[in-house]
Amino acid sequence: MAPLALFVGLDIGTGGARAMAVSATGDVVATGQATFELEHQVHQGKWHEQSPHSWWQAAVGALQRMGQHLTELRVAPETLCAIAVDGTSGTVVGVDVDGRETGAGIMYNDGRAVKQAERLNLLASRFCNKVGYQFAPSFALAKILWLAENAPQQFHTARYFIHQADFITSRLTGVPAVSDYSNALKTGYDLVDDRWPTWINELSDVREKLPRVVAPGTRIGEIHGPAAAACHLPEGLPVIAGATDGTAGFLASGANQPGDDSTTLGTTLVFKRLSKTPAHDTQGQVYSHKLPGGLWLPGAASNTGSQWIRTGYTDCDLEQLSAQALQYLPSEILCYPLTTQGERFPFCCDRAAEFCEPATNHSVQRFAASLQGTAFIERLAYEALDQVACETTSKRCDIFATGGGSQNDHWLQLRADITGRAVHRPACPESAFGSAILAAAGAGVGDVWQASRQMVHIEKTMVPDPSRKDQYDTYYERFKSLLHAKGYLRNSPASGVGTPL
């Protein structure tokens, strides 16, 4: 390696791409980002499609801007040692033999494949019991089956079906059909036995269109000439298998002990726990990613997050508003800040809707109640996760916070107070940083966990304020009672925590 070795992480999200060049000691040297051109996006009802070409354009733009930043710093391109890419989990696109898209990308939150998911759960019932989760309409395999049954021409035109991150790596390498087992989970890959399961052979037309799968952190190729020219990257730069954005975000969080939890607070809330074994959830809400080194990552995602801020407080000074909200916390106003109908975790209820009781027209009071409500959801989520995962919060393990919402110190302290656990924020809580860790591991810095410990630095830690515990506990119990009264939860015989109706 060069004296200054840099590793590139590229994150492809819902609205854009972000590239980041990171040193072996975790210093972010250069960044670049670009948004998607979404004029051809379809987001109506249960359908959500995007143009894969817009993903590639944004990736190219983000990498070019990162390269320009390096040039301004007089950092030579030869310092770049590897690149890894993450993308949204469950997003799938068909490509031809040369890796060109044959249709729109069906996004992670597309829910059209309800009947296909039900049939997959019947066909693969033993497999589902084995791996501890069930297929949901948002899973990639259900969407592929939907295309086979409802858009046969589009289905048969595709030589392979790959994931969002795979599509970008195929453009970088010229190799169209390589995935990683983090992204392939929702396509039915058997993470326990590390192979495509035999029951998928019954879907013969589907099975022959599935990609080769490797572990995250595995070298899968190198940047070829056209991509190098477009992205302003060195030709021959090693390309390392990445992961889903949630898994990459977990690696960026600093969590590294079984029982540690990681919450990504972005548009939605994503919960993950490091575990020695996969979770088994008969309700099908929790599923477990596998990580290199034999560890597992049980987790799930809520439909809530910080989206309510974007829709209701777009023109506000959020730092000032958060400071003003402190005088109204703890809040007797109980709020569940959903921006769309339906919730998937910590309970699953299609008719769940936003509520704020008692109602208030005071914007700061409502803001405070929404901050508190989001933290209540986080606490409830980990109680639900305790029921199906082996490592539980009874060990009082810490929470590692990533996502844009983690940057707010007031909110971070509130979350510590409500969960009763220390909450840590890493210096760079971004999925692109997690992909840079995978790139470093693939380039020989060490295994994924050695690279993580070497590169992740905790910037801020909030510990619970014991003087607020009793009042928050009281309001939290009222919050759960209100969820029961609305029919969103019922009592679990095991622990009394809410389970889905």
Image: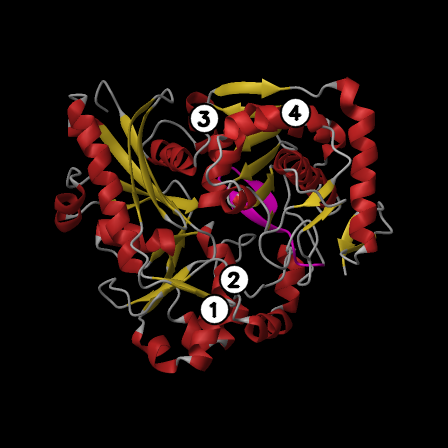
Q: Quadrant of the C terminus?
A: bottom right
Query: Badges 1 and 2: C-beta atoms under 8 Å apart?
Result: yes
Q: Find numbered disc 2 in the image and state the secondary structure of the residue it sits on.
A: loop
* Left or right for 132, reference 109: right
* Left or right for 415, reference 36: right
Within 10 Å of disc 4 (Cα), the crowding (few <14, some 14-19, many 20+) is: some
Real-space Cα separation, disc 1 to disc 2, in angstroms: 7 Å
Disc 1 target residue: 143
Query: Badges 4 and 1: C-beta atoms under 8 Å apart?
Result: no
Of labels 3 and 2, earlier in sequence is 2
Query: Badges 3 and 2: C-beta atoms under 8 Å apart?
Result: no
Residue range corresponding to the magenta coloring: 283-300
Examine the rendered structure and indicate whether residue 193 appears above or below residue 209. Answer: above
Disc 2 target residue: 139
Disc 3 target residue: 450
Disc 4 target residue: 326
In front: 132, or 201? 132
Residue type for callout 4: Leu
Within 10 Å of disc 3 (Cα), the crowding (few <14, some 14-19, many 20+) is: some
Rendering coords of residue 265 (x, y %): 54, 38
Q: Find numbered disc 1 in the image and state the secondary structure of the residue it sits on.
A: helix
Real-space Cα separation, disc 3 to disc 1, in angstroms: 37 Å
Of labels 3 and 4, earlier in sequence is 4
Q: Find numbered disc 4 in the image and state the secondary structure of the residue it sits on.
A: helix
Real-space Cα separation, disc 4 to disc 1, in angstroms: 45 Å
Please check the rendered image and state whether residue 114 is part of the magenta-colored stretch, yes or no. no
Examine the rendered structure and indicate whether residue 132 appears above or below residue 293. Answer: below
